Image (spheres, grey):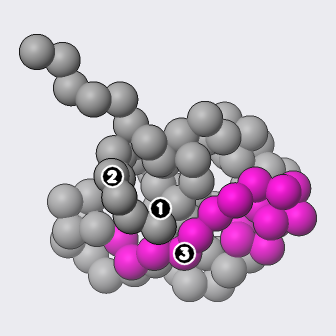
Amino acid sequence: MSALPPTHTLFLVPSANHAVQGEQALLRARIECRLLPVPRQVSSQCGVCLRVDWAERHRAGEVLGVAGTVVEGTHDIRMDGQQ
């Protein structure tokens, strides 16, 4: 039995400032995103991450890079029934 495909990608950033900067850049590029606390299954550290639809992950990564947003890592996840 195969695992269900991911629905979203989380972009981990080093600070809330990077998260807000990244959110603004993604919204200007018309990429839906959401700031979320980093889920415990991803990292035990406190912090904020950016969530984008999995289908937009490559474009979002490019936009964040051009904007100068530091991304420390990405995680593809499945989030059923959540906003």
Q: Is residue 48 above or below residue 69?
A: below
In the image, what residue type sits under mark 2?
A: Asp
SS under mark 1: strand
Task: Give yes or no for residue 6 being in the magenta stretch.
Answer: no
SS under mark 2: loop
Left or right: 43 as drawn, with respect to 25: left
- Magenta part of the chain: 22-38
In x, y percent, where is residue 83?
47, 67
In the image, what residue type sits under mark 3?
A: Leu
Q: Are marks 3 and 2 in contact (CB under 8 Å)?
A: no
In x, y percent, where is residue 47?
40, 80
- Disc 3 or 1, which lies upstream in sequence? 1
Q: Which residue is mark 1?
A: 12
Residue at the image point whose x is 20% and y is 68% from the top = 40
Judging depth in this view, the residue of 47 and 1 nearest the camera is: 1
Q: Which residue is mark 3?
A: 35
- Disc 3 or 2, which lies upstream in sequence? 3
In x, y percent, where is residue 72?
49, 57
SS under mark 3: strand
Q: Which residue is mark 2?
A: 80
Left or right: 18 as drawn, with respect to 2: right
The answer for how far apart the CA atoms under marks 2 and 1 are is 20 Å
Q: Is residue 65 visible?
A: no
Q: Nearer the viewer, mark 2 or mark 1?
A: 2
Q: In the orientation shown, which residue stands out farthest toward the top?
A: 1
Left or right: 83 as drawn, with respect to 30: left
For the N terminus, give its image quadrant: top left
Q: Is residue 40 visible?
A: yes
Q: Is residue 39 above or below residue 7?
A: below
